[in-house]
Image (spheres, coloured by chain):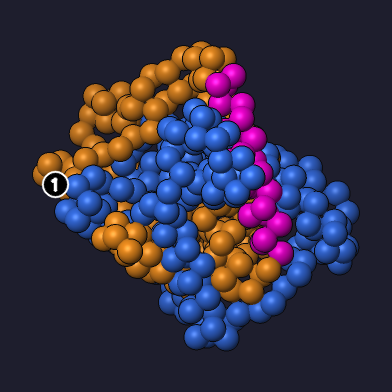
């Protein structure tokens, strides 16, 4: 088993295993320092981000929306976790020179061509559907996938199977046609 | 910044660093897994789960941390899980990896992030309707697999390891 890939990356087994350790340390640290066990997750932050943006135009609407009240529009632990992911990825990619400005992903360009506009529309619409689904399911591959399975949650196992099952089905339908 | 915010930021930096070093942030890797061509993200996720579950189960069994199962709300998980899967395939990022992809220069992730913020806003508007319909169908609550099966969590941990190792060996043999 190689621990390093050709471009300076780490074996996914090594990097993944370290994320497992990070998740446990984080669960312990949040329990001790915040008084409540927090597990890694990402999608609720998008609700808060939406709340912050909507507040600029319609503050009273956000204040009276049941879902924003439930999830609380605030710069909480998870919001900073998401900002941290950005910073961590930036540091890692600059350090090993894998940082690359990319306007269209290669696999997308292979199927749909190099148009940034097409990619933007696809990513935007896909994003709407995916996040609507993640909020309905109450989690994403981080919250349900990683954190749910580590806790042996029934919901996490079912959700992760659906994420990948339907993801594979749609990916085959959408990207396999030309090649 | 509060303690919680600092903790979140530092944990996130570590998480983002490892996601990037594992090369799982890229659109091509996420799509590669869905097309069964490149199993990098499956290896990464399963490794994290296998290692993490030992610590999480040990700490919760010792009463040091509390588990936080998400509810097994049938309509929500089935419909939400399917919608997420479909959107994920088109977008090629999940919520956590989208911001990481932006960090490593894949600036087109901004469109995915904008779409996800719009999706979250849409969900907030429809929440009262969903609460009265899909979310009200059937909810088994916050349940764990050990409770459902009536066995020790460690038996399940062992089963996960026993099932994953041959899968990893097979991936490596097939060069996936």
> Residue B122: percent from the left, percent from the top?
64, 35
Q: Which residue range is magenta in the image?
A: B108-130
Q: Quadrant of the N terminus of chain A?
A: bottom left
Chain A's colour is blue
Asked whether B125 falls inside the magenta stretch, the response is yes
Give the drawing colour for chain B.
Answer: orange
Is B96 on the left or on the right of A78, as rendered? right
Residue B100, given in percent of the width and then of the height, sits at 54, 65
A126 is within the stretch colored magenta: no
Image point 63% across, 54% down: which residue?
B113
- Which secondary structure type mostly characterizes the magenta part of the structure? helix
Which residue is more in the foreground, B133 or A113?
B133
- Badge 1 is on which residue? B64
**Quadrant of the rendered image containing residue B120:** top right
Residue A43 position within the rendered picture, expressed as x and y whole percent measured from the top left? 51, 46
The answer for which chain carries disc 1 is: B
Q: Nearer the viewer, residue A13 or B13?
A: B13
Residue at coordinates 43% horizontally, 48% vertically from top-left? Answer: A74
The answer to whether A128 is drawn above or below residue B46 in the figure is above
Q: Vertically, is A117 above or below B123?
A: below
The residue sitting at 23% across, 29% down in the picture is B151
Residue A125 in which image quadrant: top right
């Amino acid at each position: 088993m190689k621990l390093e890939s050709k471009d300076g990356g780490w074996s996914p087994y090594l990097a993944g295993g370290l994320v497992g350790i990070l998740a446990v340390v984080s669960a312990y640290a949040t329990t001790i320092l915040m008084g409540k066990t927090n597990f890694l997750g990402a999608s609720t932050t998008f609700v808060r981000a939406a709340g912050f943006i909507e507040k600029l135009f319609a503050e009273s609407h956000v204040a009276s929306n049941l879902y924003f009240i439930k999830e609380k529009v605030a710069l909480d632990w998870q919001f900073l976790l998401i900002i941290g992911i950005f910073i961590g990825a930036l540091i890692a990619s600059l350090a090993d020179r894998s940082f690359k400005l990319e306007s269209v992903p290669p696999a997308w360009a292979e199927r749909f061509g190099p148009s940034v506009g097409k990619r933007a529309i696809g990513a935007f619409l896909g994003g709407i559907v995916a996040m609507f689904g993640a909020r309905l399911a109450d989690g994403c591959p981080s919250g349900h996938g990683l954190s749910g399975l580590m806790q042996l949650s029934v919901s996490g196992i079912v959700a992760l199977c659906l994420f990948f099952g339907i993801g594979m089905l749609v990916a085959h339908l959408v990207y396999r046609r030309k090649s | 910044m509060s303690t919680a915010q600092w903790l979140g930021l530092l944990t996130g930096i570590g998480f983002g660093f490892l996601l990037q070093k594992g090369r799982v942030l890229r659109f091509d890797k996420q799509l590669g897994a869905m097309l069964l061509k490149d199993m990098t993200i499956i290896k990464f996720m399963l490794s994290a789960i296998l290692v993490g579950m030992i610590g999480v189960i040990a700490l919760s069994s010792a009463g040091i941390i509390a588990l936080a199962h998400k509810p097994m709300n049938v309509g929500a998980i089935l419909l939400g899980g399917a919608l997420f899967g479909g959107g994920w395939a088109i977008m090629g990022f999940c919520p956590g990896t989208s911001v990481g992809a932006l960090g490593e220069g894949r600036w087109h992730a901004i469109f995915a992030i904008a779409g996800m913020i719009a999706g979250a806003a849409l969900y907030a508007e429809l929440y009262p309707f969903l609460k009265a319909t899909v979310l009200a169908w059937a909810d088994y609550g916050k349940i764990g697999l050990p409770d459902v099966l009536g066995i020790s969590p460690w038996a399940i941990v062992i089963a996960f390891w026993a099932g994953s190792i041959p899968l990893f060996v097979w991936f490596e043999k097939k060069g996936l």
